[in-house]
Image (cartoon, rainbow, N blue to C red):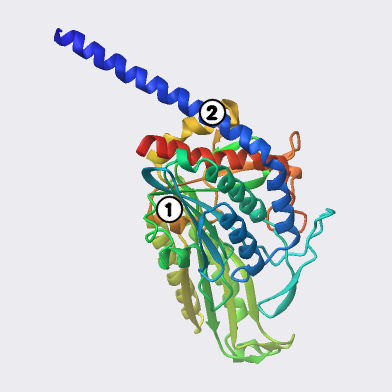
Amino acid sequence: MSTESRIMKFLLSTLLIGLIMAVGTAQNYQEIKQKATDIEGKVIEWRRYFHEHPELGNREFNTSEKIAKHLKSLGIEVTTGVAHTGVVGVLRGGKPGPVVGLRADIDALPVTERVDLPFASKAKSEYIGQDVGVMHACGHDTHIAMLMGAAEILAGMRDELQGTVVFLFQPAEEGAPPGEEGGARLMVKEGALSKNKVDVVFGMHISSGTEVGNVNYKPKGAMAASDRFVIKVKGKQTHGSTPWNGIDPITIAAQIIQGMNNIVARQTPLTKEAAVISFGKIDGGVRNNIIPEEVTLIGTIRTLDTDMQKDIWKRITQTATNIAEAWGATAEVDIQQGYPVTYNDPTLTQEMLPMLKTTAGENHVHLVDAITGAEDFSFFAREVPGLYVFIGGMKKGMNPKDAPSHHTPDFYIDESGMKLGVQLLCNFTLRYMDRHH
C-alpha cells in the first residue's frame, strides 16, 4: 500500500470515528431531553417545596436533609455537613474517566415574599439581630431542583458514564452570617474538590430577565470580583450651633464619597473593563444639634480585572485618608476581599459551545457582556477549569424591563425554564466525559 493510500485510510477512519462519536453524542442529547421531560413534574415539585420552605445561609438544615435523602435513594455516595450545611454526592460511573463537578447553591435571602403563589414563602427568621421574612428571591430553589433532576438522570445512566460526577450542593452563596465562614470558599478549604479529585466544574444561574429557552454565556471574566470596604472618619464632636469648635466628620464623609466617585469616573480605564464603587450604608450621629465624633461609611467594590482591583483599592485608601487629613480628621480604611472574578475558562467554554447550541438551539445561545454582579462559584473556578452560564426564567413574550429583579419581594421564575437547565447539567457531563475519558 502506498504512503498516500495509508494517509487516506487513516483520514477516512478518523473521520468515521468522529462521525460515530457525533451521532452517539447526538443520541445521548436526545435521550437526555426525553428523560428531562419525563421528570419535569418532579423537578417542579421539588422547586416548589424549597420555595415554600427557604432557609438562610449556613442554616439550610431541612434543605440539605431533603437533598441528601434524594441522593441516597439514587445510590449516590453522600457526605453531609460540608461547609456547615452543604451536601456532596459522588456518582461513580461504570467506566474510567474524568471527574466532573456540578454545583447548585441552596440558600435563600432575608426578603419577605410578595408574589401571589400557592407555594409562596411565609417563613420567618432572624438576620443580624432583626426579625426578617425569608424567600428564595434569587432562584436558588430552582438550582437545587435542577441539580437533583440531573442527579436522577445521570444515576440512571451510571453504567454508561465514562467517569465520576460530583454533585456540589453549596450553602451560603449569598454570604455567611457575620463572624462565620461559609459558602464555596469553605467547601474548597474543606476539600470538596481536592478530596474528590474534581477535574472541571460547571454551574448555572436562572435569570428572571432572560426569556425561557435561552442561554447566555461569556468567556473569561463573566462576573465581577466583589469586595467590601469600611471607612471610619474620626473628627471632633461639638454643638451643632458652633461647628468651628469641632471637626465635622459628616461633611468630610460627604467629600470622601464625592472623591471616591471620581476614582471610577476619572481615574479608571473603563474601556479595559467595567468597575463600580457603591456606598450602601452611612452611620453617624444621634441627634440634630450634635456634630458627632465619628461617621462610618460602608460599601462595595466591583471589578473584572485584578490589576484594576489592586489600583482601586490603593486609590480608595489614598483618597479617604488625604481628604480627612486635609480637614484635620483621620480616616481608617478597611477593605475586605470578597468573591474573586467568576472566570470562565476560554478553552472549556469553546469546547462546550457546540453542546449549548445543540441543546438549546442555535438561535437561543447568546454571547453577552460581563456583569458586575458577583458569584462565589468563582472559588471553585479558581481551583479547576470552570464554566458558569445563565438560563432563561422569564415568561415567553414578556418585556425584560417588566420582569421583577432578583433579590426583590416580587421576584418570579417561570418554571418551564428548568427543564433546559436539567438537560444542560447532564450534557455538560456527557460532553466533557466524551472528550476527556
Q: Position of residue 280 (x, y in %)?
A: 62, 68
According to the picture, the residue beneath numbered tag 1 turns out to be: 381
Residue at the (57%, 57%) spot, across then down: 72
- Report x, y in % for residue 118: 84, 54
Give residue 70's position: percent from left, percent from top: 61, 56
At numbered mark 2, what does the secondary structure look like: helix, strand or loop? helix
Q: Amino acid at mark 1?
A: Ala
Q: Can residue 228 be seen in the rendering of this structure?
A: yes
The answer to whether any part of residue 212 appears in the image is: no
Q: Residue 68: which quarter of the image?
A: bottom right
- Pointer 2 or 1: first along the chain: 2
User: Mark 2 = which residue?
Assistant: 358
x%, y% of residue 356? 52, 34
Locate the N terminus by quadrant. Answer: top left
Q: Dot 1, crowdedness within 10 Å: few (<14), some or many (≥20)?
A: many
Q: Residues within 10 Å of mark 2 (few under 14, many from 20)?
A: some
Q: Quadrant of residue 251?
A: bottom right
Q: Is residue 240 left or right of residue 318?
A: right
The answer to which of 169 and 157 lies nearer the viewer is 157
Disc 2 vs disc 1: which is toward the camera? 2
Residue 282 is drawn in which quadrant?
A: bottom right
- Per the image, label 1 sits on a secondary structure element best described as helix
232 left or right of 412 in image = left
What residue type is disc 2 on?
Thr
Viewer-nearest residue: 341 or 80: 80
The quadrant of the rendering that contains the C terminus is top left
In the image, taking residue 95 as reference, residue 401 lies left or right, namely: right
Q: Looking at the image, is 169 positioned above or below residue 403?
A: below
Between the residue at mark 2 and the residue at mark 1, the CA separation in whole angstroms equals 24 Å
